Amino acid sequence: MANSPNKKNNYPNNIGIIMDGNGRWAFKNSFKVSEGHKKGVDIVRGIVEESVKQKINSLTLYAFSSENWKRPKAEINSIKKLVINAINDQVPELKKQKVKLKFFGHLDDFGKKIQDKISFAEKETCTTDSQLNLNVALGYGGQQDIIDIVKSVSKEVASERLNIEDIDGKIINEYSSVPVDEIDLLIRTGGDKRVSNFLLYQIAYAEIMFVDKFWPDFTRDDFSSCLNNFKKVSRRFGKRI
C-alpha cells in the first residue's frame, strides 16, 4: 500500500470520491433509480481517464457502503447487476490504460458470482507498471474497518506474534482492507457535507471538497477544478509555516 509521491508537491497523489446523488439525479430527471446508477458508471469512466492523464497515483471510489444494504431490494439487485456489467464492459479498456483495479470491503456479502467476477477483474488488470490504481469500495464502512483492524491486531497480540509496543500507523495500514495508506483529497458530490463513514482513518489529513452537483452531472472539468483548488491549499500537517 505504499504511496508513489507525485513530482508536484502541491498535487494530490491519492484521491477519494464519495459519488453521491445518483438516485436524486434519477428522480429529478424522471428516471428509474437504476438509470441514475448506470449514468454514474459512465461518469466514472471519464474521471478515470482524466486521473490517468493527470498522473494521479490512486483513485478510491465509494461505490456501495455497508449502510447501503438498507436500501430497497430491487435497487440493491440492480446495483449487483451493474457491478457485473461494468466489469465486463470496462476491464478491456482499463487494461489498455494500464489501470490496476482493486475492490475492498466485505465482499463476501455480495455472493460468489460477483466475487468471482471481481477476482477476474483484479487478475486481468494486475500489472507492475500501472498508470493508476483504481480502488472500489463495495460493502465498505470506515467504522467497521477499524473494528476489523482492532480484532485482527488483538489476535496477533494475544498469540504473542505482535507486541503492543510495536503497534503503529504502519501496522494499522497493514491490517486495513483499504489499499491506500492516506488520502490527500476527498471529493463528495451531491451537496451533502459529511464523510459518511468513508476512509475514516485514511482521510485524517485530507483536504475535503464538497460539490453541489449530483454525481451523474459531475464532469471532467469539475474534477480538474478540484485538482486546481487543491494546488492553492497550504498543507501544514500541524507545522507553522
Image (spheres, grey):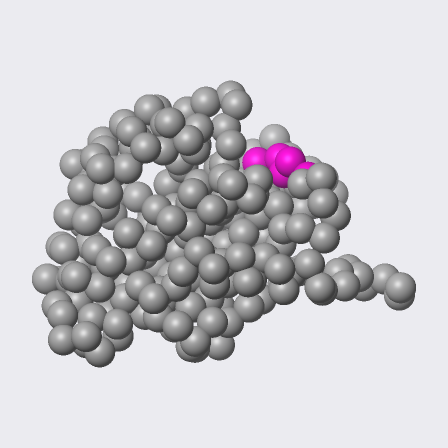
Query: For the stretch drawn in magenta, what is the main secondary structure?
Result: loop
Please indicate whether residue 211 sits to the left or right of residue 41 in the image: right
The magenta stretch spans which residues? 1-5
Question: Is the C terminus in the top left, top right, bottom left or bottom right quadrant?
Answer: bottom right
Q: Is residue 2 magenta?
A: yes
Res. 21 in view: yes
Farthest residue to the top: give it.
128
Q: On screen, 221 above or below 126?
A: below
Residue 231 or residue 192, whichever sits in front: 231
Is 182 within the magenta?
A: no
Residue 106 x/y as whole percent? 34, 47
Question: Quadrant of the rendered structure where residue 153 is?
Answer: top right
Asked if residue 5 is positioned above or below residue 79 in the image, the reply reads above
Residue nearest the viewer, comparing 179 with 156? 179
Q: Residue furthest right?
A: 241
Q: Horizontal placement of 89 versus 7: left or right?
A: left
Q: Say which residue appears at 22% left-offset and 78% top-offset.
A: 28
From this view, report whether residue 32 is shown above or below residue 182: below
Q: Residue 93's image quarter?
A: top left
Q: Is residue 148 visible?
A: no
Tell me where residue 164 appears, x and y as whole percent.
69, 43
Return the x and y of residue 89 as percentages of the image width and height: 22, 37
Location of residue 171 in the rendering, given as x and y in whole percent from the top left corner = 63, 40
Q: Quadrant of the N terminus?
A: top right
Q: Nearer the viewer, residue 151 or 65?
A: 65
